Amino acid sequence: MPRAWLIANALWLQVGWWACVLGAKVPWLLLLVPLGMAVHLTLCAARGSEVRALLRVTLAGCVLDSLLGAIGLFRFEAWPLPLWLVLLWLVLASGLRHSLAWAGWPFWRGASVGALGGPLAYLGGARLADVTLPLGAVVTSLLLVPIWALALPLLVRLAARR
């Protein structure tokens, strides 16, 4: 995979994350996601398998966040999930076969990054999008560490399936 593509994909993940999280309060920013996804899919060589991966990961992520919401880890105004969070899963999925593919193997590498990055992304997103954390930031973070230590490498592997 060309290095420029990996860098562009990593940048897209950052822009997409901000667009989704800030889009919770400024909805027009969410329009950047379909635009970015159209560019992403246009540039993907294996478009069919990419679309299937995007759907698998987005569905898995939405199920995960719905379960976490159902057990009271966080609370949204929209049920089961707000649009911005569904789109955020789509954005994350768009990097799992590209700039984040390294996080699937070896397992420990993705687990390490997931254990740190997952809770930080949730806490930052919750603060910016006014998501309620009924258990508080510290307890929520401690619960998210093992969840994301498993989730990130498994999501990369799910995305890699043909």
Image (spheres, rainbow, N blue to C red):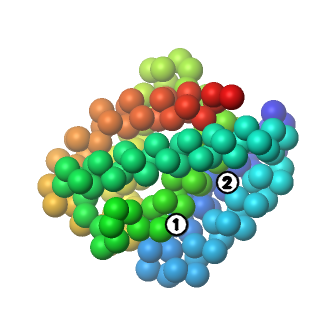
Which residue lies at the image location 28% right of the left edge and 49% below the top edge? 68
- Say which residue label 2 marks: 11
Q: Residue at x 53, y 49 (%)?
A: 58
Q: Position of residue 153 (x, y in %)?
A: 49, 29
- Amino acid marked by disc 1: Cys
Q: Which mark is residue 40?
A: none
On screen, residue 65 above or below 31:
above
Left or right of 42 on screen, residue 28:
left
Left or right for 136, reference 48? left
* Residue nearer the viewer, 137 or 28: 28
Any part of residue 35 in sight:
yes
Q: Position of residue 126 (x, y in %)?
A: 34, 63
CA gap, disc 2 to disc 1? 14 Å
Q: Residues within 10 Å of mark 1 (few under 14, many from 20)?
A: many
Q: How many marks?
A: 2
Q: Residue pushed farthest top?
A: 106
Tell me residue 14's x, y (percent).
59, 56
Secondary structure of residue under mark 2:
helix
Find residue 104 and report its image quarter: top right
- Comparing 82 with 117, the one in front is 82
Report crowding for label 2: few under 14, some 14 to 19, many 20 or more residues within 10 A (C-alpha): some
Q: Which residue is mark 1?
A: 20
